[in-house]
Amino acid sequence: MTAESTHREMSLLSRLLSGLVIGLGLIFTFPCTVCAHNVFIYAWVDGDTVYTESYFGAKRKVQGGLIRVFDLPGKELLEGRTNKKGEFSFKIPQKTDLRIVVEAGMGHRNEFILKAEDISDVGAVAEPLKTGGTKAESTHSISADAEQIKAVVEQALDSRLRPLRQELAAIRKEKSPGVTEIIGGIGYIFGIMGLIMYFMSRKTGG
Amino acid sequence: MHISEGILSAPVLISGAVLAAAGTAVGLKKLDYERIPQVAVLSAAFFIVSLVHVPIGPSNVHLILNGLIGLLLGWVAFPAILVGLLLQAILFQFGGFTSLGVNISVMSFPAVLCFYAFRRGVRNEKAGLSMLSSFMCGFCSVLLGGILVALALTFTGKSFINAAKVIVIAHLPVMIIEGLIVAGCVKFLKKVKPEILEVIYDG
């Protein structure tokens, strides 16, 4: 008798706990997934060109997907289609934040915001170099040298950073679901089953 | 066939959500206590099977199983698909929260429709007719789902015929595979565990 009642209390407790876990899980996962879907786009700047890559999950590229570029207020600046490798590139239309949207058909859509500071750091590098010239009479030649130095540094940086960018793009691609998500999802489903059974059993049994 | 966020207009999203809520209400009313574990298993199957990509054709398609869920659950397909889609949106980032209602409606109405259209054929004594009806149930659920997605996209300014053509052609392999899956499941269940199929004998 007592054993049965403690067993009941235990199962009630465990069900309440599982409900709590599910609820908390829902609350915590909600904000980070609102903006994410199963088509992805990634963009980076190289020189005066913006490169974009669009893909479904880890392997499949978006071929012939529509890419549209907006400024943040929502004015469309340009559009184009991805090639077979899911890539699309364009000259920087203006040095503001850019919203790059991919539409991959059948209701697949995602966007990437390219920040203005990622675009305009080209101009920012030149300033300290120019003021670095202390002697007034040689300012002109130093600024010319600075231009050259800037170009060389940028080139070197670009080639050095390229693997890093590709690495970053690869990391982003690994967002496709893994074992944790799959097992977690199944767990949730059986948790929900338990909850519904609990409430229905109370209704019919009590 | 998950419609992402930011594509559909508010009226389409709202009507999708209302229809999904109505369907889910009917489904929950028809849900018996004894069948809850079965619903959960099918919901889990729906949840996972979206990861099975069909590598045929140029676009990104995966198995859906709404035909099987419809045939085994009837109206209860709504809550089963709701749970599956919700978790796919949370964990896999498939679809989205605002488009959840539309996605539920798009997957579940064909399931229920095919349930009523084909259950008589499926429970037929003749094995051939039963197999054919099962196949058609799986096939048509995906086909109708594709047509509904195209219909939803039409309101965004896309031409219905074009959208429908693209989606239906992309899902042709999926339709055939799911037809075979449903036929296989029905054959197996009739032999091994016929009580699971009892829902098709009600009424």
Image (tube, rainbow, N blue to C red):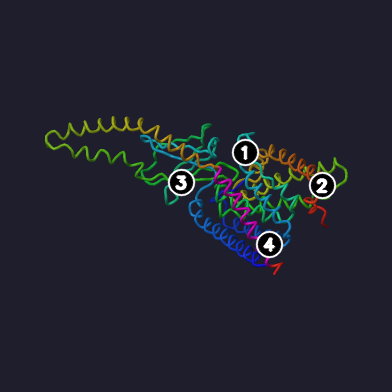
Quarter of the picture containing the C terminus of chain A is: bottom right
Depth check, front residue: B162 or B187: B187
Depth check, front residue: A93 or A124: A124
Q: Which residue is mark 4?
A: B25
Q: Which residue is mark 3?
A: A76
Are callouts 3 and 1 both on one chain?
no
CA distance separating discs 4 and 3: 42 Å
Identified by mark 1, the residue type is His
Q: Position of residue A4 (x, y in %)?
A: 66, 64
Could you classify mark 4 by the number of other residues whose Cα lies within 10 Å: few (under 14), some (14-19), or many (20 or more)? Answer: some
Asked if labels 2 and 3 touch by Cβ distance under 8 angstroms, the answer is no
Element at label 1: loop
Q: Which residue is mark 2?
A: B122
Quarter of the picture containing the N terminus of chain A is: bottom right
Q: Which residue lies most toward the bottom here? A: A206
**Residue shown at the point (21%, 31%) measured from the top left:** A145
